[in-house]
Amino acid sequence: QVQLVESGGGLVQAGDSLRLSCVASERTFSTYPMGWFRQAPGKEREFVASTSWNGGITYYADFVKGRFTISRDNAKNTVYLQMNSLKPEDAATYYCAKYQGVDYSRTYYAKYAYDVWGQGTQVTVSS
């Protein structure tokens, strides 16, 4: 089973940028969509962004549109999340996940449609 490892989190100030990375352990990475989710303490894990297998179709949660960009490099088995203009409310543990659903355009935001998750990387934003 594929393993996912996130990195790139850290402590930043409001308005700063971070780029998260998620590396997959298998070459089959290039065949499935990938997503980023986040979870703040005491809150549910929520959808942030997703990308189709070739990066051609991306979706974003409303609260990150215009600030975050998801991308992927299939040659490196890596998906990225570029986060700009960070806000204190963006503080959370960020997880990448492998999509295994059957209708990406309808279920890209659903946690149940993802079957493999990374261990998470923590993002802290000070005001």
Image (cartoon, helix red, strand yellow):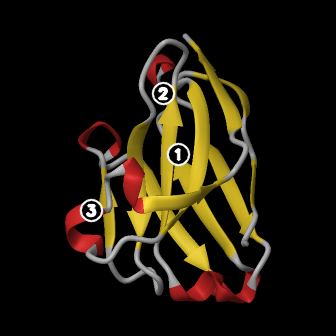
Q: Which residue is mark 2?
A: 90
Q: Earlier in the sequence, mark 1 or mark 2?
A: 1
Of the 4 image quadrants, the one containing the C terminus is top right
Q: Is 59 on the left-hand or right-hand side of 38?
A: left
Q: Which mark is residue 83?
A: 1
Say the numbered circle drawn on residue 120. Answer: none
Asked if 2 appears above or below 108 in the picture, the reply is: below
Instruction: Indicate whether 48 appears above or below 93.
Output: below
Q: Mark 3: few, some, or many residues within 10 Å (few <14, many ≥20)?
A: some
Residue type at tag 1? Met
Q: Identify whether 14 is placed above or below 9.
A: above
Q: Dividing the picture into quarters, in which one does residue 123 lie?
A: top right
Under tag 2, what secondary structure? Answer: helix
Q: Give the residue at x 71% y 79%.
A: 77
Residue 111 spot, x, y in % from top left: 40, 49
Residue visible at 73% across and 88% down in the picture: 27
Front residue (pair 63, 51): 51
User: What is the x, y in percent for residue 65?
Assistant: 30, 48
Q: Which residue is mark 3?
A: 107
Considering depth in this image, is 75 or 44 the residue closer to the camera?
A: 44
Image x and y of residue 43, in percent: 44, 18
11 vs 96, left or right, is right
Residue at horizontal 52 percent and vertical 69 percent from the top: 71
Query: What is the distance, in whole Å, between disc 1 and disc 3 at their CAs?
Result: 23 Å
Residue at 65 percent of width and 51 percent of height: 19
Residue 17 visible, this angle? no
Tell me whether circle 1 and circle 2 mark residues in contact (CB < 8 Å).
Answer: yes
